[in-house]
Image (cartoon, grey):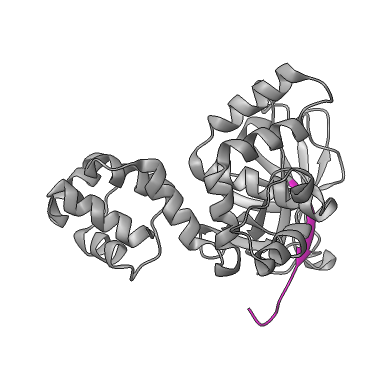
Amino acid sequence: MNYADLLSKYIYESSMSLGEISIQMKEKNHPIDRSYISKLKNGTRPPASEKVNRALAEVLGGDPDKLITAGYLEKAPKEVQELISNYVDKIDTYTAIIAMFCAEPEQLKQVKDIYENLKNLTIEDRLDFITNKFNRMIVDRPDIPKDLSLYTRTLNDSFKKIYTEKPLSRIEVWDTIKNEAYHEWIAANKIPFGKYIYLIYNDDSMINIKINKGSKVLIKIIETKLGESDNLNNIESGKLYALIYQDNVYIRRVFLQRDALTLQAENSEIHPLIINDLKDIELIGMVISAEFDPNE
């Protein structure tokens, strides 16, 4: 059952009007109007976000995970929807496989810990992690699905070709020009192992190194450990980073001094920014690459 049909089913079984649903959604801090709900159930709008879908299912007495998964699947490119369905159908199996590959050899307890941590993720985050990790493994070792006997009779020849030759992964995109966030599906071989986002940059402050306004910049997220965020131990002086300062997103070459950071632009018209209070900085991650399409 697709997303719109499932949502329609939940609405019908709840015996609630769209107006009543809208009121209860507002009470859950997810204000959506009856027109938007109507478009969702009629399939004239793309599926809602994970948080909205969870709240909707709870209001309607439906299964949140099923509604979230249906929305995730429908927003995936058509050429990989069958592949994602396979991940969904065997989500615990794939979670266990990823846990085994992420753990040190013969460390059973570590495998169990990773497995439990993955199961505690939200549905979309868990599917993203599985899809991105497993697809990346397929890029490096296309024999993995066959070795693990993961093919089934439902996987036809064209599906196998997508599975082994053209895996796609989902990545979050932060558009700092339009001030919005969304997801894209891209070739898995463009994303190394690790957690990454794309950032659409909003000015020409780094133009001398070909990061223009509108460039799509691949950022490796830096997971700062608890208690280390204040002193930014993960920064390497002289490297390029994305960070947030006073509610603004910057890409800068960062230089560490004893008690301060210097944010250096790659544009002679922009002066360096010296920050003395490191608590004012939120580190996003390290710049890996950038691409720019002047036609977009």
Residue 256 placement (x, y as % from top left): 83, 36
Image height of 180 relative to 62, above or below: below
Q: Work out whether residue 175 can be spotted.
A: no
Q: Residue at x 50, y 38 (%)?
A: 122
On the picture, is 282 further left or further right than 165? left
Tell me the quadrant of the picture where the C terminus can be found. bottom right
- Report which quarter residue 205 is drawn in: bottom right
Image height of 223 relative to 133, above or below: above
Whether residue 123 is in magenta: the answer is no
Name the residue furthest top: 109
Image height of 257 relative to 62, above or below: above
On the picture, is 88 further left or further right than 111? left
Name the residue furthest front: 153
Residue 77 placement (x, y as % from top left): 56, 66
Q: Nearer the viewer, residue 245 or 175?
A: 175
Name the residue furthest bottom: 295
Q: Residue at x 84, y 52 (%)?
A: 140
Q: Nearer the viewer, residue 261 or 187?
A: 187
On the picture, is 182 further left or further right than 148? left
Image height of 203 relative to 129, above or below: below
- Report which quarter residue 292 is drawn in: bottom right
Residue 75 placement (x, y as % from top left): 49, 62
Tell me the quadrant of the picture where the N terminus can be found. bottom left
Q: Nearer the viewer, residue 52 or 189?
A: 189
Q: Residue at x 74, y 43 (%)?
A: 148
Q: Magenta residues, as a range?
A: 286-296
